Image (cartoon, rainbow, N blue to C red):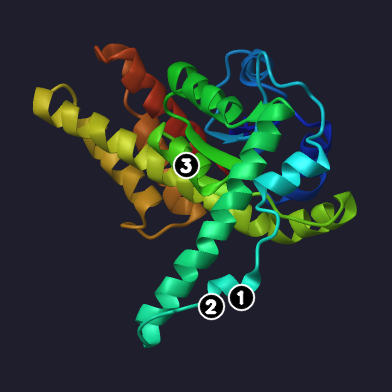
Amino acid sequence: MQPTFCFIDDADFELDNFQKNVAPAFKGIEFIYARDFDRALHKLNGRRCLCFLLDIYGAGAGGGSGELPGPESLASALGQGFVVDSLYENLEGEGSEKANQFLRRLYARVQVAQEAFGAAAGQLGQGPAFGLDSLAKVREHQPWAAALGYSRKALYADAAAMCMGGADGVLQKPQGVDEAAIAKASHQAAPELAQAAFAAVDFRLAGLAGQVGLRLCWDGVSLSLAEALQQAVGQLTCREKRSPEARGKALEGLKAVRLDDLELDQGDVEVILALWDWLSLET
């Protein structure tokens, strides 16, 4: 069975675009597509997911009015009457000192636009709570899985909130002026997105499996399993020479240990089985 990833987004265009233009670059991966986490969990039907790609901005319960902000209110929020020359007035110092002062002023204008965007999104019933809620459910139901924010609209603060909430990183959706341009940009960016997601799975499983191995050594439960985990982790962290043959050997070492004969915590068993799934990836 192929390793399974999930893409969660509440927009039909995004789900369709990902399936057509991004997913083919994830060689050897089966994708589940869903508009929210609960539907994804239902589609998984008991299978382990190794990576969740989570849209950050989405519709929230009890959202805003759903009406577009008016031009006057938006102009006010964006700072109507802003004079570009004010960015250059009375700049002090030279070199990097002057440059940093200018950039701080310029970013203050960017921040005004970000705040206007956040207010408009809230009025339209969208916000980062969608992604944070999905992330919390991933950590509750499938804690071994890597979880990556994947957004075109998220702001710096939203990305920071996702990472503080336990995400393994945030990826940017390719941008474009219309759907055709987004589709083209998505196709072009797909290999890098796949590489980043694969690296996130490597990093998360290596960390979790390493912790399991340390506990086994400390408790003296199964040194053979600890050694097998060490070999498997080496395939994820590049400590060992990576190849399909080496991954296969590491997988055989794990499967040679009868987990049923060991009194392991169920969470540790799930990590080991997730590692099995990942080492089974044919690249």
Report, in whole angstroms, how far the alpha carbon at label 2 lies from the one at label 1: 6 Å
Q: Give the distance between the C-alpha atoms of the residues marked 3 and 1, in whole angstroms.
A: 48 Å
Going 56% across and 46% down the picture, which residue do you hit?
A: 155
Q: Splitting the image into 4 quarters, where does residue 186 fall?
A: bottom right
Give percent across and percent down for residue 30: 68, 35
Q: Residue at x 51, y 52 (%)?
A: 244
Residue 201, which numbered label? 3
| Percent of width and height locating residue 237 | 35, 52
| Dot 3 amino acid type | Val
Q: Residue farthest to the bottom?
A: 94
Q: Which mark is residue 85?
A: 1
Closer to us: mark 3 or mark 1? 1
Please give the name of the residue rendered at 57% of the width and 59% of the height, measured from the top-left corner: 109
Mark number, residue 222: none
- Give the percent coordinates (x, y) of residue 6: 63, 31
Locate residue 205 relative to residue 77 in the image: left or right: left
Mark 1 residue element: helix
Is residue 150 rendered to the left or right of residue 227? right
N-term mark: 3 or 1? 1
Q: Is residue 188 left or right of residue 221?
A: right
Question: Viewer-proximal residue, 41 or 124?
Answer: 124
